[in-house]
Image (cartoon, rainbow, N blue to C red):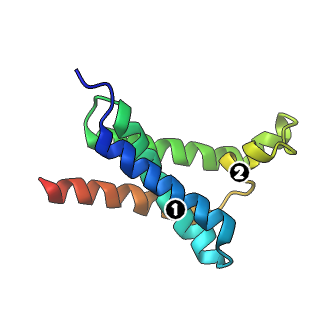
Amino acid sequence: MKIIKLPYLIISLLLLIVEITIALYSKNEFIRAVFGDYLAVILLFYLLATFLRISLHKIAFLSLLISYLIEGLQFIHVLELLGLENNTVLKIVFGTSFSWMDMLAYTLGALTVVLIHNYKK
């Protein structure tokens, strides 16, 4: 029995490299903020799909839900509430400010993976 789905893991790692490259080198605000969030939900989808044994539609929904949750935590400034606002790693993972544009980017990313996997069928 397979423990992981290797193709999904490879896609996850490639997307992670792209995300890190964007974070380190992109000066374009649209690429960093919007496209980065669009890719983030796709990365999360493939990472979850690597390990979970549920339908890809459910994984897409779970990825979107997690992304929305993180954005909601930004809205209530959870890192400040927990006294963790100076933790660099958490600031990178959770972000620092709520944005409706981020919510749209997450939604489009989740729709993209659903469309890709529906097209493959």
Residue at the outermost top position: 1
Residue density around tag 1, few if under 14, some if 14–19, many if 20 or more, within 10 Å: some
The amino acid pointed to by label 2 is Ile
* Residue 100 percent location from the top left of the image: 59, 63
- Identify which residue is drawn at 36% across, 37% down: 50
- Identify which residue is drawn at 46% across, 56% down: 15
Q: Which residue is mark 2?
A: 92
Residue density around tag 2, few if under 14, some if 14–19, many if 20 or more, within 10 Å: few
- Identify which residue is drawn at 40% across, 46% down: 45
Q: Which residue is mark 1?
A: 18
Asked if residue 69 can be seen in this view, the reply is: yes
* Residue 75 percent location from the top left of the image: 71, 50
* Tag count: 2
The amino acid pointed to by label 1 is Val
Q: Quadrant of residue 82?
A: top right
Name the one closer to the observer, 25 or 97. Answer: 25
Question: Which of the marked residues, 2 or 1, is nearer the chain's N terminus?
Answer: 1
Compared across the picture, whether 95 is left or right of 116 comes to: right
Per the model, the C-alpha gap separating discs 2 and 1 is: 15 Å
Compared across the picture, whether 64 is left or right of 19 comes to: left
Which quarter of the image is occupied by the N terminus? Answer: top left
* Residue 18 percent location from the top left of the image: 52, 62
- Helix, strand or loop at label 2? It is helix
